[in-house]
Amino acid sequence: MRRELTLTDAALDEAALVRARTAPAGMGAVVTFAGLVRGSEAGAAIRALEYEAFRAMAERQFHLLFDALAERWPAVESVRLVHRLGVVAVGEASLWVEVVAPHRAEAFAAGQWLIDEMKRVVPIWKRAVA
Amino acid sequence: MKVTVLLWSYFRERAGAARFELELPAGATLGDALRETCRRAPALEAFRAAMLTAVGVDYQRPDHPLREGDEVSLFPPVQGG
């Protein structure tokens, strides 16, 4: 399975990510997900979220998840994941995930699983910027 | 032996420090480093139930044996996405 992980302070350019997509013949499903910063956190209005990562461990944990994903859904051809760090304004994307697979069932399932697991084990934290 | 404890996210503010350098006896475990850190920064006690613990870049449990120069990380539940 091809994998591409980017942890970056730079704004997320979804159009550029889509343009860079490669899907070999036989790959009939591309699922992408963008997570946007909401305008409120715990009921209070916010301007942005500031993300912090323990970068070396985050990279390690993401790759362990990619390994597990490849084992669980062997047909998945590629995963690309971008997570913003630093200050991300309301309405901007903090997370972008793409899964390419032969069929939609495994693409949706693998993408959902990956994001759920990320939220459980990858050392990234956020704080509200009022 | 010497080990370094790194604190992440709001643990830094609660502890008033980003890291501690500990001198522990041979045979010490991650749990020993955790106890010593909480002794130096008692504010962390309140977060122990949900605290996540790692050595290097891997999660480890309190009975994990430490080695000279290990980097222990303590942090609250993660919040990516």
Image (tube, helix red, strand yellow):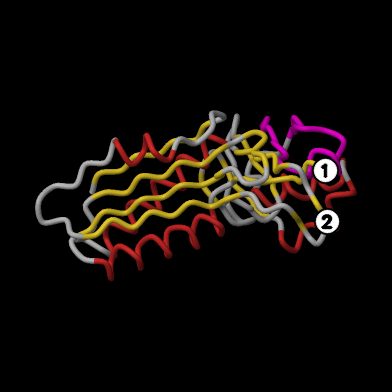
Instruction: Judge the density around disc 2: few (<14), some (14-19), many (≥20) Cα neighbours within 10 Å.
Output: few
Residue under the image location 32 percent in, 52 percent down: A67
> Where does the image place residue B60, in percent across and percent down from the top left?
56, 52
Residue under the image location 42 percent in, 58 percent down: A114
Q: Nearer the viewer, residue A3 or B14?
A: A3
Q: Is residue B20 magenta?
A: yes
Q: Is residue B18 magenta?
A: yes
Q: Secondary structure at mark 1?
A: loop
Asked whether the residues under the numbered discs 1 and 2 touch, taking CB atoms below 8 Å apart as contact, a structural biologist would say: yes
Label 1 or label 2, whichever comes before in sequence order: 2
> Where does the image place residue B39, in percent across and percent down from the top left?
87, 46
Q: CA distance from mark 1 to mark 2?
A: 9 Å
Q: Residue placed farthest to the left in the image?
A: A25
Query: In the picture provided, is A105 more to the left or to the right than B12?
Result: left
**Residue extent of the magenta highlight:** B1-23
Residue under the image location 54 percent in, 32 percent down: A11
Q: Residue placed farthest to the right in the image?
A: B42
Q: Nearer the viewer, residue B9 or B39?
A: B9
Give the numbered dot on residue B1: none
Q: Which residue is mark 2?
A: A44
